Amino acid sequence: MSQYAGNCRFLWNKALAINLHHLENKQPLLWYQELDWFSKLWKKSDEYEFLKLSPAQTLQQTLKQLERAFKDAFDKKQPLKKIPTFKKRGERDSFSFPQGFKLDGRRIFLPKIGWVNFRKSREIDGTAKNVTISRQGKYWFVSIQVEVELPEPIHPSISMVGVDMGVKRLITLSNGDFKEPILISFFKDKIKRLQKKLAKKMKFSANWKKLKEKINRLHTKISNIRHDTLHKLSTTLSKSHAMIVLENLQIKNMTKAAKGDMDNHGSMVKQKSGLNRVILDQGWGMFKTFLEYKQLWSGGQVLFVDPKYTSQTCPVCNHRSKDNRKTQSKFDCVLCGHKEHADVVGAKNILERGHRLLACGETDISLLSEAGTRQLSDELEPALV
Ligand SMILES: [Zn+2]
């Protein structure tokens, strides 16, 4: 399986390099048919004959995925997609079978590999269309893509909720509920310590490999915790509310401000970048994506509203002032004296804006300029492990 994943990675990188070179020289891109022709040529060469070891369809599937990635990157309707990147050894190792596999209870037949037992984490409904084998740390995973006919969903609830995403609290709802941030600093510190140790070891020695493996396992753990938390949270929210209102955040701007500029170095900048790192760590982009598709499935909706001054406006008398926000967590209206947790105030204002959006039909989606979202995804990627 390592060999198959490695061959797919090799082919992806090789085909990608050609296309990037074409892009640079303003030549047309090579699509699947041409790339497949090249791939067959490489297979016959002495230099790349290791490609022959792979099941042909896994290589073809890689080229199809690359073609899709390029098409998506240039698709204006998909502003979050970007130009594909090179794959590194041990990162995103995977290969797919579009056909030739068979399912039988808790075992699966894979072409050229044979029957393999797997731990079934959930029932497989619908028709299996595609099987992807991927590696995370030292474990191999199988994901089965299925096709299911779904009736037009109607959300069971009619309620609407505003969600404030923050640093001290991961999310706060307009009804006052909140969720503590995901604590991963413990693992991060451990990784840092191990990395220092790793630097002192001789590269590729037995001890180095052992340490490297340990670090990879921790990375996987962080990624799992984050994934799990955000999934649970978005499922609960999506099940409970037909309308979920979120702030239309431009994370790029926030991180840019935190990096500081020529005449703005200092402790404040340092503090802020720490804060922003935490924000990114929480995986906002991932959360947003989960909510959007879960709402789509359940017949609900996600609304995006302008985030300006949500934390400074009084939900009772509407008075807006910086002074209303006493500290990170305390809101105390200077006009009417209304006191509340600042994040709850934020969530209430977000909900209010959602109501207005529905009533007036004004659309805030335009705020998410194409450039803006592209940047957002650039910023989020490394934080999502
Ligand atoms: Zn007030």
Image (cartoon, grey):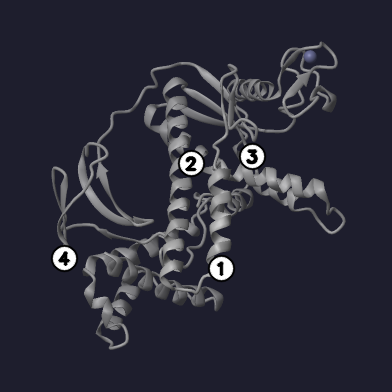
Residue located beneath label 3 in the image? 249
- State how far apart marks 3 and 2 are (Cα): 20 Å
Mark in front: 2 vs 1: 1
Q: Is residue 43 left or right of residue 104?
A: right
Q: Is residue 142 left or right of residue 161?
A: left
Q: Which mark is residue 199?
A: 1
Label whose residue precedes the other's in the sequence (4 or 1): 4
Please state, as top left, top right, bottom left or bottom right, where the N terminus lies in the image.
bottom left
Question: Relative to 88, does residue 364 appear above or below in the rendering?
Answer: above
Mark 1 Cα-neighbour bin, 10 Å: few <14, some 14–19, many ≥20: few
Which residue is identified by label 4? 112
Q: The disc labelled 3 sits on which kind of residue?
A: Leu
User: Eyeballing the image, is 154 above or below 15?
Assistant: above
Q: Does residue 103 sit above or below 243 in this rendering?
A: below
The earlier-in-sequence mark between 4 and 2 is: 4
The amino acid sitting under disc 2 is Arg
Mark 4 → mark 1, Cα distance in angstroms = 39 Å
Q: CA distance from mark 1 to mark 3?
A: 38 Å
Q: Earlier in the sequence, mark 3 or mark 4?
A: 4
- In the rendered image, residue 169, in percent from the top left (x then y), is placed at 61, 30
